[in-house]
Amino acid sequence: MVEKDFSEQEHQAALNHLKESIPANEELESMVNIFKAFGDMTRVKIILALSKTPLSVGEIADTLDMSQSSISHQLSLLRQLNLVTSVRHGRNIHYRLSDQHIITIFGQTKDHIIEDEND
Amino acid sequence: MVEKDFSEQEHQAALNHLKESIPANEELESMVNIFKAFGDMTRVKIILALSKTPLSVGEIADTLDMSQSSISHQLSLLRQLNLVTSVRHGRNIHYRLSDQHIITIFGQTKDHIIEDEND
DNA sequence: ATGAAATATGAATGAATGCTCATATATTCA
DNA sequence: TGAATATATGAGCATTCATTCATATTTCAT
């Protein structure tokens, strides 16, 4: 095979610029961290619960049948990533999703899965 | 506080149905697994590279400056999740994204991050 | 002030995970 | 067939991570 066909040429062109086209670690890290946050059943459930209504830590723990401590740890992580915000109301602290974008991403992913099942 | 105000009533109503409104583990698991896959720098880079052009294992390893073995292991995981597909071409195996949905999800997440930086 | 209730936090532990190394498998070519 | 090239795979190791347990902190009620 002396001559490459056209699509092979395209491939070569893409290959040449590929290395530079991939963003540096620092730029990708926040995205990766958000996906990491979504990659845990407990956190996904917390987020789904908060998508219905703001909730206190205790309410989330009750809803998910999990310990207060575990939920609190996870909320702390979600808060660090700005995925949730918290406001104290008396003895309770109300957590809510920081933006609705999150739910859109969930929906998009569900779409991917559904498309997948139709094979 | 004898009477609850209106938004408090809404909250109670939401709380009552909350437990049932959260999907069972089996239904969430595939979503969580996809997010887990996206929650790793190497796999994100592989996906971004494949979003430009189909690539062989070796080409990916070269592009990302990582070992053949490591890339192959990760590709195997991405394949299990139907995020990529592979076709053998002679000695090489060409990997490609199984659908463009994936890139949409990445974009959506980037939007979330950008919105976030404008606080 | 004091006790109770809600939440946060640090340390410890077991499980999951990513990489490496060695090796197996598959394909081409001479 | 046999050597070379590309990819896959299993075991081992170090690290990360989710939960638990014990305890600290904050706020309310009395």
Image (cartoon, coloured by chain):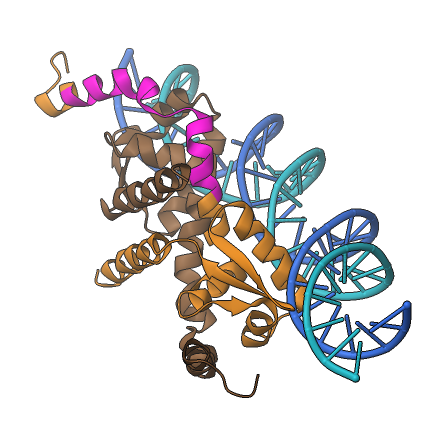
Chain colours: A orange, B brown, C blue, D cyan
Indicate the position of residue B18 as horizontal and vertical percent values.
45, 77
Q: Quadrant of the C terminus of chain A?
A: bottom left
Q: Is residue A75 magenta?
A: no
Q: Is residue A72 visible?
A: yes
Q: Find residue C23 and report its image quarter.
A: top right
Relative side of B52 to D26, left or right: left
Relative side of C17 to A53, left or right: right
Relative to B115, residue D18 above or below: below
Relative side of B56 to A9, left or right: right
Write the residue at 45% across / 20% down. Answer: B65
Write the residue at 23% across / 30% down. Answer: B53
Q: Nearer the viewer, residue B76 or A111?
A: A111
Q: Nearer the viewer, residue B111 or A6?
A: B111
Relative to B82, residue A24 above or below: above
Q: Find residue A70 and report its image quarter.
A: bottom right
Q: Nearer the viewer, residue B102 or D28?
A: D28
Q: Quadrant of the N terminus of chain A?
A: top left
Q: Is residue B93 visible?
A: no
Indicate the position of residue D3 as horizontal and vertical percent values.
43, 15
Write the residue at 48% across / 54% down. Answer: A84
Q: Find residue A112 and report its image quarter.
A: bottom left
Main SS of residues in magenta: helix
- Magenta stretch? A10-33
Residue farthest to the left, as pictured: A6
Indicate the position of residue A116 as horizontal and vertical percent values.
26, 58
Indicate the position of residue B106 as horizontal and vertical percent values.
32, 42
Relative to B112, residue C13 above or below: below
